[in-house]
Image (cartoon, rainbow, N blue to C red):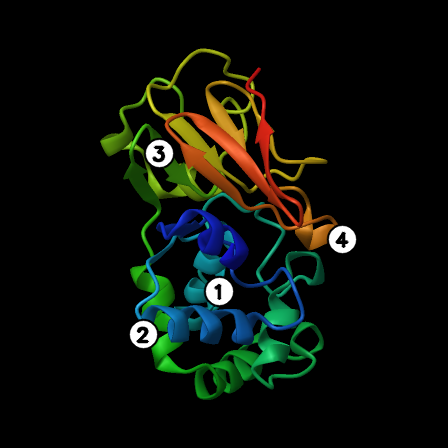
Amino acid sequence: IADDKARHGPGPVIHLGDLVDRGPDSRGVIDFLLAGIAAGQDWVVLKGNHDRMFGRFLRNPTEQEPGLRADLGWLHPKLGGPDTLQSYGVANAADRPVAKVHADARLAVPQAHLEFLAACPTLRLAGDCAFVHAGIRPGIALQDQSETDLVWIREPFLSEATSHGPLIVHGHTAIEAATHYGNRLNLDSGAAYGGPLSAVVIEGREAALLTPEGRRRLPGR
C-alpha cells in the first residue's frame, strides 16, 4: 500500500474487519490501527463478526452472538477467541472457567480498544462501492440492512448474480484469491488460513490487486 501511494498518490484505506481472532497478535493489530489513525492516516476500519464477538464477550460473556451456532461460543478454539486473549496476556482461556477468563480479560484489555471496536462502522459508502465485512441481504435497502447480516451473511448473498446497485466490497468468506464477480468483490483470500492478505485499489467499479510488482487488474465476471 505504501509503495502504491508513493507511485500514484494518497487515497483512503478501508479495512474490512476481523481485526482479531485471525492471527497471533490481535492486540498489536488494534494498536497499529489506533496509532495510524492518531497520526492522521486516512483509514476507515469496519467491524467484522469476530470483532463484534470480542466486544460482546467483554460486555457479557454469557450472551450468545447472533449469527453464531448455539453450540459455539467465542472461547471455542476454532473461533480464535483464546488466541486474541493470549495476545493481551490472558492465558489458557479455552481451558478455564468462563467467569475467571472474563474477569482477567476485563483487566487486561484496554478500554480504548473496546471503545474503538464498538465505534467501528459496519457499512461505508464510497464512490460506486459499498464496503462491508460479510455482505448484504439481497432485496433490502442498504440503510435497512441489519448489523448481523453485514458482519455474518453468506447465503443468499453469495449466490445472488444480479446488481445490488453499488459494487459490494467484502471479505468474510475465504476463497483462493481476490475475485471480482461483477456485482461484488470478495477480498478474503484466506489470510487466516495461510493464504495471502489481499489489498486492492478501486477506481469506479474496477479493481486492481496490489502485488510486489505493482497493480494487477482483477477482471470482472
Left or right: 200 with respect to 122? right
The amino acid type found where label 4 is placed reads Gly
Where disc 1 sits, the SS reads helix
Q: CA distance from mark 2 to mark 1?
A: 23 Å
Query: Which residue bears the numbered disc 4?
Result: 194
Query: Which residue bears the numbered disc 1?
Result: 54
Res. 213 image quadrant: top right
Which of the marked residues, 4 or 2, is nearer the chain's N terminus? 2
Which of the marked residues, 3 or 4, is nearer the chain's N terminus? 3
Q: Residue at x 63, y 60 (%)?
A: 22
The amino acid type found where label 1 is placed reads Phe
| Number of numbered discs | 4
- Kindly check if marks 2 and 1 are in contact, taking CB atoms under 8 A apart as contact: no
The amino acid type found where label 2 is placed reads Ala
Q: Residues within 10 Å of mark 1 (few under 14, many from 20)?
A: many
Left or right: 209 with respect to 134? right
Which of the marked residues, 1 or 3, is nearer the chain's N terminus? 1
Q: CA distance from mark 3 to mark 4?
A: 27 Å
Q: Which disc, if any, is residue 130? A: 3
- Kindly check if marks 1 and 4 are in contact, taking CB atoms under 8 A apart as contact: no
